[in-house]
Image (cartoon, rainbow, N blue to C red):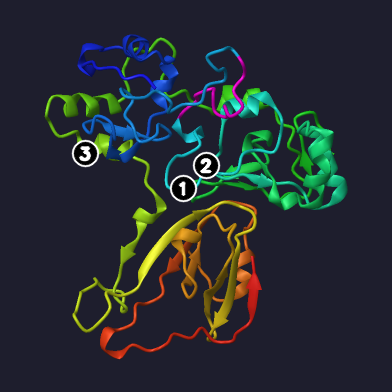
């Protein structure tokens, strides 16, 4: 950890500031605020992946390919520094997305996909072909083959002719009778053999064009903090990670604005969660004729801290959930789950909550 005591406004260009911090210029483009102040100086905004500190007090917010001794770092996914959207934490996700199962250096250089990942085909022969295309080491193939839906494939391994960006900002796979790759070969499944370098060259827009010395806008928030001025709200908001918990909104039972009353609850809270593909780790059951509620939560559920037994699953990607089968729709892509939190019992009429004995299923 290195602590630099300096004034940010004295370094007006990217080159000057990056040299002062001893970081590559591209590292300035992968900054996301945590929403809190630095735990050391208690003055500047803390940034993600930096142990709760600002960029002045510590410089570990970005992945490095090499250690100080020249050895390759074990955990360096995203070291290409192509933008904050490829870092381990970004946007509204409450957890880092699954990393790609491949062993390709270019994939590791890009980083993580917060716009969703895909899964290996379930048919053994197709799964074997996909593993060959992704250069999966022989010793790892039996594990993937035994549970292919539990391993992720990054979207940049697929041809842009086969994938599309959905309305929710997440990648989905086109439904085609046959998939033709860039070599002209046909497959019954989307082949993960796209040229990853082409994805970098053709689909990633660098946050800052080569030769541009303009500083990223987050620096202005630091300058204001150092001069005693309030940081611009729009800049702070644009650079702050929005945790899914922060999307909770309180509504009244009838759909109008909530009103607190001493004898009643404040109404159900609605929580929107961005859920990665794969097993959910949730048990659900029918309550009544058209309500699906959480009946159990596994330890491996990645969002278990944000749901409770008894919460009602209201919708998935904006579509109402009225039966258990709705939960499995689109499970191979990132989805937005909306839960209505279990209502708080009225204090003067406390009574037990039951969740029925309807049909159950685990996902």
Query: Mark 2 Cα within 10 Å, few/some/many (few <14, many 20+)?
Result: many
The residue most toward the right is 125
Residue 278: image location, x then y, percent: 64, 54
Specify the quadrant of the image occupied by residue 158: top right
Which residue is depicted at the point 81% across and 47% down? 145
Asked whether the beta carbons under mark 2 and mark 1 sit within 8 Å of each other, the answer is: yes
Q: Disc 2 versus disc 1: distance between alpha carbons?
A: 8 Å
Which label's residue is closer to the chain start, 1 or 3? 1
Residue ID for mark 3: 233
Relative to 173, residue 160 above or below: above
Relative to 196, residue 359 above or below: below
Left or right: residue 192 compared with residue 281: right
Identify the secondary structure beneath mark 3.
Answer: helix
Relative to 298, residue 48 above or below: above
Query: Mark 3 Cα within 10 Å, few/some/many (few <14, many 20+)?
Result: few
Residue 74 is one of the magenta-drawn residues = yes
Query: Mark 1 Cα within 10 Å, few/some/many (few <14, many 20+)?
Result: some
**The disc label shown at residue 93, or none:** 1
Magenta region, mostly helix, strand or loop? loop
């Amino acid at each position: 950890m290195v602590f630099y005591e300096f004034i940010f406004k004295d370094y007006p260009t990217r080159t000057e500031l990056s040299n002062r911090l001893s970081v590559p210029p591209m590292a300035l483009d992968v900054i996301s605020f945590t929403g809190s102040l630095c735990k050391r100086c208690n003055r500047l905004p803390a940034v993600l992946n930096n142990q709760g500190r600002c960029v002045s007090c510590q410089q570990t917010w970005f992945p490095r390919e090499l250690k100080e001794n020249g050895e390759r770092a074990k955990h360096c996914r995203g070291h290409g520094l192509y933008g904050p959207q490829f870092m381990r934490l970004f946007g509204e996700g409450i957890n880092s997305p699954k990393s790609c199962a491949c062993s390709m250096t270019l994939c590791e250089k890009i980083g993580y996909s917060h716009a969703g990942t895909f899964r290996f085909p379930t048919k053994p022969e197709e799964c074997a072909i996909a593993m060959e295309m992704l250069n999966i080491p022989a010793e790892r193939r039996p594990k993937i083959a035994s549970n292919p839906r539990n391993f992720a494939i990054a979207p940049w391994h697929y041809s842009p002719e086969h994938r599309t960006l959905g309305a929710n900002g997440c990648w989905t796979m086109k439904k085609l009778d046959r998939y033709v790759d860039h070599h002209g070969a046909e497959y019954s499944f989307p082949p993960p053999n796209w040229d990853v370098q082409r994805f970098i060259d053709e689909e990633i827009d660098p946050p800052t064009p080569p030769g541009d010395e303009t500083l990223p806008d987050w620096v202005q928030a630091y300058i204001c903090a150092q001069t005693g001025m309030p940081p611009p709200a729009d800049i702070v908001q644009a650079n702050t990670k929005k945790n899914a918990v922060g999307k909770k909104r309180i509504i009244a039972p009838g759909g109008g604005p909530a009103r607190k009353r001493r004898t009643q609850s404040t109404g159900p809270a609605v929580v929107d969660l961005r859920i990665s593909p794969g097993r959910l780790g949730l048990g659900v059951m029918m309550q009544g004729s058209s309500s699906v509620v959480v009946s159990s939560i596994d330890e491996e559920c990645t969002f278990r801290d944000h749901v409770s037994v008894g919460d009602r699953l209201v919708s998935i990607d904006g579509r109402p959930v009225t039966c258990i089968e709705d939960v499995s729709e689109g499970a191979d892509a990132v989805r937005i789950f909306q839960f209505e939190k279990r209502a708080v019992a009225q204090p003067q009429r406390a009574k037990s909550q039951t969740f029925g004995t309807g049909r159950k299923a685990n996902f």
